[in-house]
Image (cartoon, coloured by chain):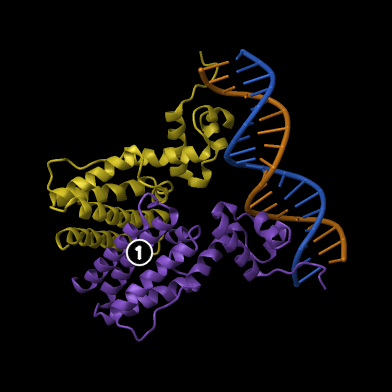
Chain colours: A yellow, B purple, C blue, D orange
Amino acid sequence: MGRRRQIDRAAILDAALALADTDGLDAVTMQAVGQRLQVTPMALYRHMDGKQALLDGLVERLLSGFPLPAAGLPWDERLTGLAEAMRATARQHPAVFPLLLTRPAVTPGARVVREAVLGALAEAGLDEGAAARAERLMSTTVLGFAASEAAGRFRRHPKAAIDEDFAVLLGWLRLMVTGA
Amino acid sequence: MGRRRQIDRAAILDAALALADTDGLDAVTMQAVGQRLQVTPMALYRHMDGKQALLDGLVERLLSGFPLPAAGLPWDERLTGLAEAMRATARQHPAVFPLLLTRPAVTPGARVVREAVLGALAEAGLDEGAAARAERLMSTTVLGFAASEAAGRFRRHPKAAIDEDFAVLLGWLRLMVTGA
DNA sequence: ACCTGAACACCGTTCAAGT
DNA sequence: ACCTGAACACCGTTCAAGT
């Protein structure tokens, strides 16, 4: 025992995410991930289809770890909960989060989140077309805010002001649903 | 004459932006920019403080080329014009645009755009604090939408649907000002 | 003053070789 | 089956040398 290091896809993503969280996206290199797993960079290629696939995997990790609001809650609380969970995820993984703005939401993890939003909007009384449009717009809005915060675009502003901004934004979103 | 290539900061940014527009951000390497100017990569360092400064310069380029709406227009048309100009810029420079979400708006170019938005909001009757908040939120929202589109997050959807999404978004923004 | 050559420490990725 | 060694074509960046 203890002769050769054993790795798998999950271990690679764990290592890459830890690296991204502590040292930023640029620190996620095949060599650094390998080193963290005590393996040569080339060993990763058996489990992961290259660097781009690794980044895709990281994004999916964020999505699949997304806490969904309790189903029994009223629609507006579910929407608010979803938005807050998104912001919390952005704060936990600021380096990876902006990549979400880059990829079509077609993966299983993205689909789950979208269905949750669509469900809340349907309960609010929006028809299918309006709900689909509102979902795109709301996701984009919340994603843009959270990604901005994660990337440090608001770093000149006190945290309290940004929290208040977000609260105002949530108010807008609610109005968007009821006022349309 | 014609003995040694002469370059300067503006020429470097021109070359880098052209490269980014046609081949993406990853194609913007010191070597590729140098080659386009028929100069070695090391020659760039005399005029530009490294790769990061080059990217910063590219972002500022986008901002400073931003067309501002005519000052005589009513506030809501100015706001709409600003948002549409932002989206047009994102379409012209899709590779560079997402970087805007990454940097605090403290450069001269960013300041000009922000003042234009604040001016329109002041004319709409918002006090200073409310205008500052609305500016942050609106810029973030429009930036998020335009960056998403530029990065290809909506590539599964027909262009007409996205245009309509944007029109709905502009309606929301207007409501945000009058309804608060 | 401003560009070049040589050099360094990294990158991602391949492929044959080892176990 | 799965990791390693060697190799390749790139990266960004420095510094002394050329003109």
Point out the image quarter for the C terminus of chain B: bottom left
| Residue placed most toward the observer, A138 or B150 | B150
Residue appearing at x 73%, y 61% in the figure: B38
Can residue B109 be seen in this snapshot?
A: yes
Residue B54 vertical position relative to residue A8 in the rendered view, above or below: below
Residue matched to label 1: B142
Residue B127 horizontal side relative to residue B157, left or right: left
Residue A179 screen position, x and y as percent: 15, 63
Can residue A154 be seen in this snapshot?
A: no
| Residue placed most toward the observer, B54 or B170 | B170
Residue B34 vertical position relative to residue A108 in the rendered view, above or below: below
| Residue placed most toward the observer, A70 or B178 | B178
Point out the image quarter for the N terminus of chain B: bottom right
- Chain bearing tag 1 is B
Residue A26 horizontal side relative to residue A92, left or right: right
Is disc 1 placed on a helix, strand or loop? helix
Residue B143 vertical position relative to residue B29 in the rendered view, above or below: below
Residue B172 screen position, x and y as percent: 24, 66
Residue B147 screen position, x and y as percent: 41, 58
Residue A31 horizontal side relative to residue B37, left or right: left
Q: Residues within 10 Å of mark 1 (few under 14, many from 20)?
A: many
Residue B146 screen position, x and y as percent: 39, 61
Q: How many marks?
A: 1
Residue D8 quadrant: top right
The amino acid type of the residue labelled 1 equals Val
Kindly give the residue lying farthest to the bottom in the view shown.
B72
Residue appearing at x 40%, y 51% in the figure: B155
Residue appearing at x 29%, y 65% in the figure: B167
Residue D9 quadrant: top right
